[in-house]
Image (spheres, helix red, strand yellow):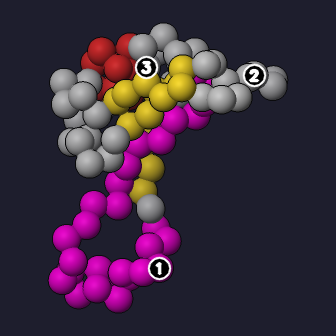
Amino acid sequence: MNKTLPKKIPVIDSTKCIRCDKCMIACQSGAIKNTTNNACAKCIKYCISMQVPCNPSHYVFSYEKCDACGLCFTACAEHAVYWFNSKI
């Protein structure tokens, strides 16, 4: 199934996101997933010694599943989800 992106798409600001799962729970289409970045090439030597605080877990959208309903936007108390005007 080839679905075009809506004009407005939700985006997560990782600097505001506290990873509470509320957006992921609110998403009825299952378009938000919690992933882990296992390929941090720039700081991996520091992560092994735990000298650099990091949280490689983050949320990503599967825009093929997203219907731009806005439930994730309203579920986020931290205002980490915002609308982005896509040009596609």
Q: Quadrant of the C terminus?
A: top right
Q: Main secondary structure of the magenta part?
A: loop
Name the amino acid type tagged 3: Cys
Q: Position of residue 56 (x, y in %)?
A: 35, 61
The mark nearer the N terminus, 2 or 3, is: 2
The mark nearer the N terminus, 1 or 3, is: 3
Residue identifier under label 2: 3
Q: Position of residue 70 (x, y in %)?
A: 42, 14
Q: Which residues are magenta?
A: 38-66
Q: Position of residue 76 (x, y in %)?
A: 26, 24
Q: Residues within 10 Å of mark 2 (few under 14, many from 20)?
A: few
Q: Position of residue 81 (x, y in %)?
A: 34, 30
Which quadrant holds residue 64? top right
Name the amino acid type tagged 2: Lys
Front position in the image: 9 or 57 = 9
Kindly tell me whether residue 55 is visible in this rendering. yes
Lateral position of residue 22 relative to residue 70, left or right: left
Which quadrant holds residue 12? top left
Would residue 47 be counted in the magenta stretch?
yes
Which residue occupies 44% across, 62% down? Answer: 37
